[in-house]
Each structure stands twice: as C-alpha cells, then as structure tokens.
C-alpha cells in the first residue's frame, strides 16, 4: 500500500545539496573512497567558550520551553552585535530566533508572500530559495549574474526586473554558492533602485558575514531609507562552526517579527534552549576570534583557485567570501569518454562522482546550469587529492 501524499509535498523537490550528501554516504557505505566537496559546513569545531556556555546551561537547568521568539538576553545580545559590528539599531522585539537561518528565511516568506507575488532572485542563488518561494506560492523572477560580472547583478538589471507585482528581493552576501561579496558602493547603487520602489521588501541573507576575506562586511540594511523594508537573516552556523546547533535569527520591522513569532508558535515553538545559551556566548565574542578559521579558508581558496586553473577548460573567478568555488564548466558539455556524454553540469557531476568518487553539486540547483559548486571546507590533503582525481577524469573527455 502506498501513502496518498499531498500535492504540496509531492511538488517539493529534495534539496540538491542534501541529495548529493545522501548519494555520497551510500557510495561510502559500499566501500568507495568518496571525497565530499558538496557540504556547506565548516570543518572546524565549535569554540571552547561556546561549548562551555552550553554545558553551564545544562547544569543550570535551562531545560524548559523558552519564549517562542527566543530568550530576551539572546535577543538583546543580537541587537548589541548588530550595533557593534554593523552599526544597525534594532530592539529585542524586532528579533526572532529560529531553528537555523533556513527556518528564519521560511518564516519571512510565509509571512510576506501571497499567491502570485513576485520574488526577485539573482542567480546563482542558494539552493533552497527557489523551492521556498514555490512553497509560499510566490512566483520566482530570476536575474542572471554570470562569472564575467563576478556573479553580481547591476542596478539596471534590478530596475528591469521590478514590476507592480514584485513583493520581495532576496539575495546573500557573501553568496552561497559563488562566494561573491557586494561592496558598499554596489549595495548603495542597488539601494537607489529600491528607494524608487517602496512596495518591494529586501531579504538579505548574511549567514556568511564572518567568512569575508576583506574582514569588512557590508550590509544593505545600513541604508536608512530602506530599513523598515529590510529582513536581515543571520545565525551562528557558518562563522562560529555551529551548524548542528541550529540557531538562526531574523531582524526586521516589528510587525514582521510579531508575525514570524506567531507562525513559529504554531510550527516549531522556540529553538533549543541549550543552543540559545551557546549562541548567546557567540554573540558576545569578538569577531576577530573567528579570524584563524577565516585565514585558513582564505589559504584554501587560493590553493583551490590555482588547482582549478590548472585544469584545461574551466573558468574560475576569485571569490571574496564563504568557502565555495563556482567554476564555469560548460566547455565540457558535449564531450564524451566513449561511454558517457556530458550534456550539462548534472551529467558532469555524476560522471566525476561515479568515475573518481568526488562529490560536488551541479549549478542547475543554484540557477546557473553552466557551473558547479565546490566546497573547500575540508583538509588541504583531501582537496589536493580531489582535484587530482577531477583533473584525470576530465582529461578522458574528448
């Protein structure tokens, strides 16, 4: 007997990044030596001070339901962090703590989007954006940003995409999957366009804020005329190596924060009490405490750019943040090893995975079908071995 599932869940695709992780685990279980470069999490441990705060919370019996929108001390600490690091003024009633930044984004979309509302998404985009908008019954409107423009859109493209039906613009900087970072001047130019269209809200996903190789993160929320329309998303997963703790947050207009808390109260209630106390310690930390991890990622970026540029046919830019490379691999489309013909990035990823057991994610999942995403959040030794395997596999395609 099969279960008659809802149309809603049948129409929801599996996350492509999680799907690649699943296939990699299956191949590993079969005895293959798989190198996984598809996972979006730091390969570092959570800092000791943060773990100590979690231990203390357990000892102090923080084992009861927290407020739905998060403990007030954590929300105050988030406001203090936003003032200290970003010169932004928020109050605790504008903050909603959720079970990861992904949860925060979904809250925002479900509270803002009505059926048919248009949501502008620059490509490449984080893999879940499109599916989330679809789940909220919105209509995706894509703006293509290619490798020639460092995967960043320009104001003229934004202006052309906005219509009376546009409700939201959503993007990330530093960007997953491209690693691109918008400068203050670039954000200011986009802000000028938004000022002419007061019906458009802006969701700024800044989860990679602390993995910015210039150490000077710029946020579009700094432009005062836009502040009431900004939904700022952040969390502790990437910058503090806390992916498993599942804490994200949204800073927004109070009306949206109240709505998100109401929604969250019916779906999940509050995020983990122990994780919140750990996140409180993270918010109090000096951003410079995360620089050793940042510097290691920068070293790996430089090494990987060199390794990829040594492979014929790949176009590679130099990203300024996150821990991904997003090479254009379209020169291999149409080539074959005599058995497999590469029709696109998905075929290429599958060919590499089953030929030399290196897992990456095809760019189709991110709205850029000519590219593939490579995470360098693993050891230098594994990265070098992976690129050696990839180079040999691609050399067999003629």
Image (spheres, rainbow, N blue to C red):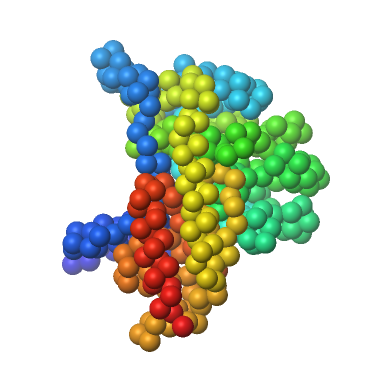
- Of residues 77 and 182, the one drawn nearer to the viewer in this rendering: 182
The percent position of residue 139, horizontal first and vertical second, equals 59, 59
Q: Quadrant of residue 240?
A: top left
Q: Residue at x 65, y 49 (%)?
A: 169
| Position of 244 relative to 305 (above/below) | above
Residue shown at 61% from the left, 21% from the top? 84
Query: Is residue 181 depicted above or below 224 in this figure?
Result: below
Q: Quadrant of residue 276?
A: top left
Quarter of the image for the N terminus: give it.
Answer: bottom left
Q: Residue at 52% across / 56% down in the picture?
A: 306
Left or right, 388 with reference to 139 = left
Residue 28: x and y in percent read 23, 59
Q: Is residue 365 left or right of residue 171?
A: left
Q: How many marks?
A: 0
Quick one: which residue is furthest to the bottom in this view?
A: 338
Asked if residue 41 shows in the view, the reply is yes
- Dividing the picture into quadrants, the one containing residue 163 is bottom right
Q: At which x and y percent is residue 336?
A: 43, 83
In this orientation, which residue lies closer to the viewer: 276 or 357?
Answer: 357
User: Front-most of 393 and 125?
Assistant: 393
Q: Is residue 65 visible?
A: no
- Report x, y in % for residue 293: 45, 35
Q: Nearer the viewer, residue 324 or 164?
A: 324
Residue at the spot 47% in from the left edge and 16% down from the top edge:
73
């Amino acid at each position: 007997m099969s279960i008659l599932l809802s149309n809603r869940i049948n129409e929801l695709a599996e996350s492509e990044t999680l799907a690649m992780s699943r296939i990699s685990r299956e191949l590993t279980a079969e005895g293959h030596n798989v190198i996984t470069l598809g996972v979006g999490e730091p390969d570092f441990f959570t800092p000791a001070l943060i773990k100590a705060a979690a231990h203390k919370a357990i000892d102090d019996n923080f084992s009861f339901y927290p407020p739905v929108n998060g403990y007030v001390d954590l929300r105050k600490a988030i406001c203090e962090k936003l003032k200290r690091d970003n010169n932004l003024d928020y109050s605790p009633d504008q903050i909603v703590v959720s079970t990861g930044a992904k949860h925060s984004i979904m809250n925002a979309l479900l509270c803002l989007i009505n059926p048919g509302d248009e949501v502008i998404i620059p490509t490449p985009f984080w893999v879940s954006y499109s599916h989330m908008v679809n789940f909220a019954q919105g209509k995706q409107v894509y703006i293509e940003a290619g490798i020639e423009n460092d995967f960043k859109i320009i104001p003229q493209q934004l202006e052309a995409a906005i219509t009376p039906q546009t409700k939201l613009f959503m993007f990330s900087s530093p960007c997953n999957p491209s690693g691109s970072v918008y400068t203050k001047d670039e954000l200011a130019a986009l802000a000028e366009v938004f000022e002419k269209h007061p019906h458009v809200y802006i969701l700024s996903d800044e989860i990679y804020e602390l993995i910015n190789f210039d150490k000077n993160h710029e946020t579009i929320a700094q432009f005062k005329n836009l502040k009431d329309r900004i939904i700022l998303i952040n969390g502790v997963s990437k910058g503090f190596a806390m992916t498993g703790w599942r804490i994200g947050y949204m800073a927004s207009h109070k009306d949206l924060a109240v709505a998100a808390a109401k929604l969250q109260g019916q779906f999940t209630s509050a995020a983990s009490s122990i994780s919140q106390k750990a996140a409180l310690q993270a918010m109090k930390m000096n951003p410079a405490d995360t620089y050793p991890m940042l510097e290691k990622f920068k070293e790996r970026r430089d090494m990987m750019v060199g390794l990829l540029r040594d492979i014929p046919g790949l176009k590679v830019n130099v990203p300024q943040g996150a821990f991904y490379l997003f090479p254009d691999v379209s020169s291999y489309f149409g080539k074959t090893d005599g058995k497999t013909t590469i029709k696109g990035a998905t075929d290429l990823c599958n060919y590499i995975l089953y030929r030399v057991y290196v897992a990456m994610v095809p760019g189709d999942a991110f709205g850029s079908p000519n590219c593939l995403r490579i995470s360098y959040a693993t050891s230098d030794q594994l990265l070098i071995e992976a690129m050696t395997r990839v180079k040999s596999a691609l050399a067999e395609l003629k």
